[in-house]
């Protein structure tokens, strides 16, 4: 198969790196997004995703045709769908963007095209939701056009595992669909892992995310217990991680953030209800992880109290507000919850984050590190970005609450660790 033109719908954390990877392999890429600002940025060679440098984007810009117009997808051999799959206000799957994108695609769908859904979703989405909508085109899935699911596994900010060397799981509606998808992804991925169906591929992605969510909840629960017991949770995790088999290290912290872990597991919970199964591990993990910002605020309050201060009127600096190190993504970041809770209690907040210039919703802009440390009564390390010297933070700030275990264990008296 020669896939010379690849369409990508949804140019965010998942879609833009994919578009660039295919363009780097010499494919023409039709890149569609409903957000005209993204189209303008791509046309200007101005990347808004950390994992894609503006230089890399500019190098392939002649081959990336960014547009808001779905009609341009008519000439694509394959179309990858990478739109958001969020939760609704009552925490149910919100397939709105996916349905909208699929409907728009069905209007321009061509015989023999391959369509691959990459967005994380519950088992059955590709076959039961996407296929019927695409078939409104008059073409039959698996016969007139090919359809597959292949979950994106990108870990934003990570450089050792990228799209190229992270095995790519995929499941086709038919064997021929999987063959087409395998040939396509073989252009940009070293290893392809074929599973028997789109459902198996959909559930694989959810298992991976649920596995992380449950294990993070387990160490977080332990952190709340060790706090009462007067044991250092980091010391215990470090020691357990010396076991060469049967243990996998997970870090406690202020709670889960990002687009994936706080959201995806509940796609399965929702679907499981149809089968009279209550997915209790998922619910419990969500509950424990949601408790963590409250636990961290209580810990901050106690640290201030020990120093003879109250939260009300205290100046508190938050170090790192994105949800993970090395990226500027603040979606569902526990730092925002912590800022909100401390503000409600009357604290005056400031923050430093090299990746997040401002928090418009909180009317805050990032304060230079030195200034933040010296101007605050207490500094809370919420996200430990690479390049920030946390031992220096511990030396300069009058009082530190370290929620990431990044200050020395033997640290000074002014440091309280989670
Ligand atoms: N971010 C991650 O680390 C990650 C990792 C693996 C999987 N995923 C999954 O991939 C999917 C996309 O996530 P993301 O982080 O890239 O989201 P994102 O919000 O960064 O990007 C999604 C893009 O889709 C666009 N969009 C929305 N509706 C559209 C429509 N109808 N037509 C065209 N474009 C539309 C948005 O404007 C946005 O640019 C989600 O299902 C997510 O769960 C994300």
Image (tube, grey):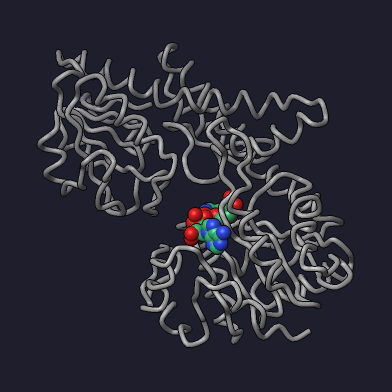
Q: Which of the image's four quarters has the N terminus?
A: bottom right
* Horizontal side of residue 268 vs 156, given as left or right: right
* Horizontal side of residue 49 vs 410, given as left or right: right
In x, y percent, where is residue 348?
Answer: 17, 29
Above or below 407: residue 188: below
**Of 367 and 70, the residue lying toward us:** 70
**Of 228 and 90, the residue lying toward us:** 90
**Of 205 and 119, the residue lying toward us:** 119
- Residue drawn at (64%, 63%) of the image: 81
Above or below 216: residue 13: below
Tell me how many marks there are. 0
Residue 161: in sight, yes or no?
A: no
Query: Ligand 1, what quadrant?
Result: bottom right
Residue 313: in sight, yes or no?
A: yes
**Of 51 and 131, the residue lying toward us:** 131
In x, y percent, where is residue 26?
Answer: 59, 87
- Residue drawn at (51%, 46%) of the image: 259
Q: Quadrant of residue 51?
A: bottom left
In x, y percent, where is residue 184?
Answer: 72, 75
Q: Which of the image's four quarters has the C terminus?
A: top left
* Horizontal side of residue 401 vs 108, given as left or right: left
In x, y percent, where is residue 46?
Answer: 36, 73
- Residue drawn at (63%, 35%) of the image: 266
Above or below 1: residue 86: above
């Amino acid at each position: 198969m020669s896939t010379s033109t690849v369409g990508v719908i949804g140019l965010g954390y998942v879609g833009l790196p994919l578009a660039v990877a295919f363009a780097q392999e010499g494919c023409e890429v039709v890149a569609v997004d409903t957000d005209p600002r993204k189209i303008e940025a791509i046309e200007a060679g101005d990347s808004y995703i950390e994992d894609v440098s503006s230089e890399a984007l500019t190098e392939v810009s002649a081959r990336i045709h960014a547009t808001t117009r779905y009609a341009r997808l008519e000439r694509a051999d394959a179309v990858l769908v990478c739109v958001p799959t969020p939760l609704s206000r009552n925490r149910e799957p919100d397939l709105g963007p996916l349905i909208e994108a699929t409907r728009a695609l069905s209007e321009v769908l061509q015989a023999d095209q391959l369509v691959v859904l990459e967005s994380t979703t519950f088992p059955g989405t590709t076959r039961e939701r996407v296929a019927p909508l695409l078939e409104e085109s008059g073409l039959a899935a698996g016969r007139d056009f090919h359809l597959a699911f292949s979950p994106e596994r990108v870990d934003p900010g990570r450089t050792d595992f990228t799209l190229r060397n992270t095995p790519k799981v995929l499941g086709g509606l038919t064997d021929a669909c999987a063959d087409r998808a395998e040939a396509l992804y073989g252009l940009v991925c070293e290893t392809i892992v074929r599973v028997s169906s789109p459902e198996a591929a959909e559930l694989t992605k959810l298992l991976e995310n649920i596995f992380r969510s449950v294990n993070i909840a387990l160490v977080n629960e332990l952190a709340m217990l060790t706090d009462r017991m007067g044991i250092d949770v980091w010391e215990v995790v470090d020691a357990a991680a010396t076991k060469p088999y049967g243990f996998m290290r997970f870090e406690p912290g202020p709670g889960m953030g990002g687009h994936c872990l706080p959201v995806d597991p509940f796609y399965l919970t929702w679907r499981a209800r149809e089968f009279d199964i209550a997915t209790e591990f998922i619910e419990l993990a969500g509950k424990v992880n949601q408790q963590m910002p409250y636990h961290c605020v209580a810990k901050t309050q106690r640290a201030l109290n020990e120093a003879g201060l109250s939260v009300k009127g205290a100046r508190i600096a938050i170090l790192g507000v994105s949800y993970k190190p090395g990226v500027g993504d603040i979606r569902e970041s526990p730092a925002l919850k912590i800022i909100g809770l401390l503000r409600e209690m009357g604290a005056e907040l400031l923050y430093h984050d090299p990746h997040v210039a401002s928090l418009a919703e909180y009317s805050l802009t990032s304060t230079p590190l030195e200034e933040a440390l010296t101007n605050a009564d207490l500094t809370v390390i919420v996200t430990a970005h690479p390049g920030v010297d946390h031992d220096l933070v511990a030396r300069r700030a009058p009082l530190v609450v370290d929620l990431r275990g990044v200050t020395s264990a033997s640290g000074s008296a002014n440091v309280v660790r989670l």
